[in-house]
Image (cartoon, grey):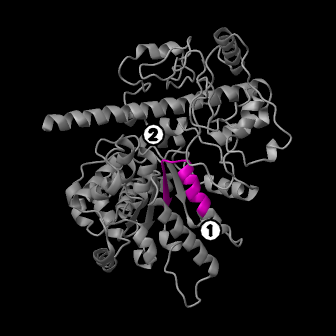
């Protein structure tokens, strides 16, 4: 029985790695196509279109270029030659449009419905398995490769009617049956012979697994989707506003950078990380959590967990505040909320982070004290969150609040997990001191003497993580103040050369840290902490 379980786990792991590898290849193929399009625009003088496309796709020619002897026109010519040899006729790359095609949206085979946002990306391969469908049609037309029409059915079209099911010749395929030529190197397009070297394991480029890819590489390689095709300009403008809150820079916060909070980190991984790696586990009653509330005193690590999600989890991260979804124009607030969740589904897997949730979802009242626009916005947010729990889209809402007792009860029901982020315990405080005042730090930047971290942790009972960071900063400033005092006393008698040659920084000692603890009081009091624990006993769900 145990052997069977091990075999099943091994099979699931291999399937998960193969699926992640295929997703990485698809994403790299999209990026390679975008780099070729950008190079084509630059070489033909479409500079304004080049700048706009670089900003919209998050791909810059200053970071990545097309490989030598690789350009869009060469690839198009090779495809025309291959098609002519294969089928004995020239390929048909364009079609004439009718007089009313540009204004018609009722044909399902040509356009999506304009009333909704597409929740799935279009097909990666066309009938001939060559041209990517993710690029903007106007961009492809400008680059000289008009986009082939979409098929009205999901059934693939066989390129060879005489030999159905036969793959086209002349193009090597990988061991998993996918097209080659999409390696994950930073140099862009990789030769097709690269895939011939892989026989069994999926090729993930420089690293052997997606977990080992650095967060900087993930953010630099991310290709942003263009905005979906809304029915009117109003929704497109609102979508552009929400898109500004998508994280495109790396917060650089790891799970290991957060001291303690093991239960909180585990629940976040259960909601975001594990469902993407092991989707077979999270079905039926085991559907992943759709909403999670982090509450507790200020400075305890709620926002740090959100930054770790943005760094470690390969999802689209929406950092939303009250200013993102509140508008002075009537009806725009609820539209912004709707567009936010539609964009989250469009960019799935994605994470929505709502900081200071009590400023958006406080208690609704019926005595007329609350404005009508605020009630409509809250109602729309509740409706959209209720829709998340009824779909299988990988969209996760992470909220943080310092005043959980001010939240609306309907909002609490939709936040399935409500976790108290309490003040750090003694081991966590010890780890925070070791992180901010390490013994092996560079003596040229921050010399640190012998410190008793356990004693300092006992002295800071009731301090939050941000309070301890402030204590460490104050302790590090004390030796520098001695240097400033001596400089002010002898500034008229010392020239710069003598000053630089004779002054040496003193290390941070135990007495400096203890003095900093004495002069820095905690920001959270004991009564407030007791109130958080009491609220957690009544409404917590961890």
Looking at this view, is 277 or 15 the one in front? 15
Is label 2 in a helix, a strand or a loop? Answer: helix
Tell me the residue that label 1 is attached to. Answer: 334
Q: Is residue 492 visible?
A: no
Residue at image point 69% right, 21% down? 72
The 10 Å Cα crowd at callout 2, few under 14, some 14 to 19, many 20 or more, is many
Is label 1 in a helix, a strand or a loop? Answer: helix
In the rendered image, which quarter is residue 149 located in? Answer: top right
Looking at this view, is 287 or 139 the one in front? 287
Q: Is residue 180 above or below residue 473?
A: above
Q: Is residue 16 visible?
A: yes
Left or right: 81 as drawn, with respect to 273: right
From the image, which quarter does the C terminus lie in?
bottom left
Left or right: 22 as drawn, with respect to 429: right
Spot the residue most to the front: 162
Relative image position of residue 12 (x, y in whole percent): 30, 36
- In 3D space, how far apart are the residues under numbered discs 2 and 1 (Cα atoms)? 34 Å
């Amino acid at each position: 029985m145990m052997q069977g379980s091990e075999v099943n786990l091994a099979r699931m792991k291999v399937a998960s790695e193969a699926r992640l590898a295929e997703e990485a290849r698809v994403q790299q193929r999209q990026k390679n196509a975008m780099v070729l399009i950008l190079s084509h625009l630059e070489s033909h003088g479409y500079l304004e279109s080049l700048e706009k496309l670089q900003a919209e796709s998050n791909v810059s020619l200053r970071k990545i270029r097309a490989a030598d002897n690789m350009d869009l026109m060469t690839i198009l010519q090779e495809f025309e030659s291959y098609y002519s040899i294969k089928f004995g006729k020239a390929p048909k790359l364009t079609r004439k449009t009718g007089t009313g095609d540009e204004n018609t949206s009722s044909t399902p085979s040509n356009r999506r419905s304009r009333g909704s946002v597409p929740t799935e990306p279009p097909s990666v391969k066309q009938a001939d398995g060559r041209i990517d469908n993710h690029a903007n049609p106007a961009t492809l037309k400008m680059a000289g490769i008009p986009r082939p029409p979409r098929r009205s059915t999901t059934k693939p079209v066989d390129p060879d009617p005489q030999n159905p099911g036969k793959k086209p010749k002349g193009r090597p395929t990988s061991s998993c049956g996918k097209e080659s030529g999409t390696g994950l190197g930073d140099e862009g397009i990789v030769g097709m012979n690269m895939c011939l070297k892989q026989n069994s394991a999926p090729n993930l480029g420089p690293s052997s697994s997606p977990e080992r890819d650095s967060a900087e590489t993930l953010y630099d390689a991310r290709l942003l989707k263009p905005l979906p095709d809304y029915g009117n300009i109003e929704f497109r403008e609102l979508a552009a506003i929400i898109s500004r809150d998508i994280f495109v820079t790396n917060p650089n916060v790891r799970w290991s950078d957060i001291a303690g909070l093991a239960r909180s980190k585990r629940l976040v991984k259960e909601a975001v990380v594990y469902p993407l790696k092991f989707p077979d586990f999270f079905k039926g009653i085991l559907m992943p959590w759709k909403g999670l509330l982090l509450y507790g005193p200020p400075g305890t690590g709620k926002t740090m967990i959100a930054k770790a999600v943005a760094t470690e989890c390969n999802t689209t991260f929406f950092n939303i505040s009250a200013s993102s979804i509140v508008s002075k124009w009537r009806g725009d607030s609820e539209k912004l909320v709707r567009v936010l969740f539609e964009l989250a589904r469009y960019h799935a897997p994605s994470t929505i982070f709502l900081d200071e949730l009590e400023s958006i979802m406080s208690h609704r009242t019926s005595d007329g004290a609350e404005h009508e626009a605020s009630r409509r916005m809250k109602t729309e947010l509740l409706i959209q969150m209720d829709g998340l729990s009824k779909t299988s889209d990988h969209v996760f809402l992470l909220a943080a609040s310092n005043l959980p007792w001010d939240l609306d009860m309907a909002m609490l029901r939709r936040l399935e997990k409500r976790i108290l982020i309490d003040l750090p315990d003694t081991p966590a405080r010890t780890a925070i001191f070791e992180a901010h005042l390490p013994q092996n730090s560079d003596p040229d930047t921050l010399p640190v003497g012998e410190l008793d971290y356990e004693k300092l942790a006992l002295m800071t009972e009731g301090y939050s993580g941000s309070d301890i960071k402030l204590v460490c900063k104050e302790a590090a400033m004390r030796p520098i103040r001695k240097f400033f005092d001596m400089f002010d006393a002898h500034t008229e008698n010392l020239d710069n050369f003598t000053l630089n040659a004779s002054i040496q920084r003193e290390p941070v000692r135990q007495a400096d840290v203890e003095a900093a603890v004495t002069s820095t009081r905690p920001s959270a009091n004991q009564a407030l902490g007791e109130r958080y624990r009491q609220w957690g006993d009544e409404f917590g769900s961890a």
